[in-house]
Image (tube, rainbow, N blue to C red):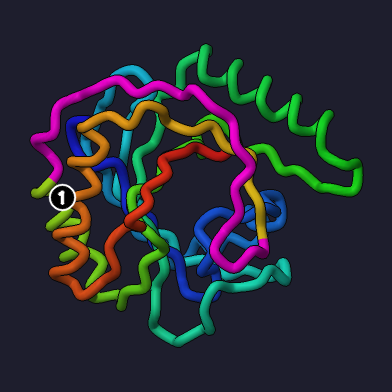
């Protein structure tokens, strides 16, 4: 990985970073308060291009938020986007189709598009608007020198969020590469300097499909 992946910040009214109802989320996207800056980044193997993106959004789909709305707060997370290669797309489609066949018919599945697939490197973060750019700058500086590397998706699991309100069909990264641990350690150091929670001690790198 050569830059940092990405930090994506949402308004607190859209505090859950991964929404099970993608169609409704897209229709509720608020474009009039969008800030976007690009960070040059390339990774090899499963790793893909990354960027720095800030989206202010409003959600009207009735989903359960992880924490109460506070005016002026933004929620986001640090992640590595995956390189969009045909092999990854084929694998993700196979995993999704198999899950749809095996899960009960009343379970509603929402497929994540290839360009949305990512591996999270942080918890959901809550920051003030004025903290966003300084945080991004620190992450970019801390992570830009990490070299490219390959990672392997070798297992499929059904995971749930902390609140137990949503579940995800995921491909997990095994074995965990030293480079991934280095990225998380470096990211955690930056987050602590902003008085933000570090990543989970029991790290479980995965990409939802």
The quadrant in which residue 33 appears is bottom left
Identify the image quadrant of the C terminus: top right
* Residue at horizontal 35 percent and vertical 39 percent from the top: 80
The magenta stretch is 143-165
Q: In this view, does 68 lie above or below 197?
A: below
- Residue 177 image position (x, y, % from top left): 27, 29
Indicate whether residue 160 is drawn in magenta.
yes
Q: Which is nearer the eye, 68 or 12?
A: 68
What residue is disc 1 on? Answer: 186
* Residue at horizontal 21 percent and vertical 32 percent from the top: 178
- Element type at marker 1? helix
* Residue at horizontal 8 percent and vertical 35 percent from the top: 145
Outermost residue to the right = 105
* Circle 1 residues within 10 Å: few <14, some 14–19, many ≥20: some
The quadrant in which residue 58 appears is bottom right
Indicate whether residue 12 is drawn in magenta.
no
């Amino acid at each position: 990985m050569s830059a940092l992946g990405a930090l994506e910040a949402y308004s607190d009214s859209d505090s859950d970073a991964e929404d099970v109802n993608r169609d409704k989320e897209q229709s509720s996207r608020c474009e009039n308060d969008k800030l976007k800056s690009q960070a040059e980044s390339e990774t090899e193997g499963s790793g893909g291009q990354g960027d720095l993106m800030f989206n202010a959004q409003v959600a009207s789909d009735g989903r359960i938020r992880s924490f109460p709305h506070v005016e002026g707060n933004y929620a986001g997370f640090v992640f590595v986007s995956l390189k969009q290669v045909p092999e990854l797309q084929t694998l993700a489609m196979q995993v999704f189709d198999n899950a749809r066949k095996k899960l009960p018919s009343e379970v509603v599945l929402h497929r994540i598009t290839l360009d949305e697939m990512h591996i999270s490197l942080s918890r959901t973060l809550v920051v003030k608007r004025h903290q966003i750019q300084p945080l991004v700058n620190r992450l970019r500086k801390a992570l830009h020198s990490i070299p490219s590397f390959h990672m392997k998706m070798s297992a499929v699991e059904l995971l749930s969020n902390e609140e137990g309100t949503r579940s995800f069909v995921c491909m997990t990264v095994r074995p965990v590469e030293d480079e991934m641990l280095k990225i998380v350690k470096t990211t955690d150091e930056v987050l602590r300097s902003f008085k933000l929670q570090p990543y989970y001690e029991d790290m479980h790198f995965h990409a939802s499909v």
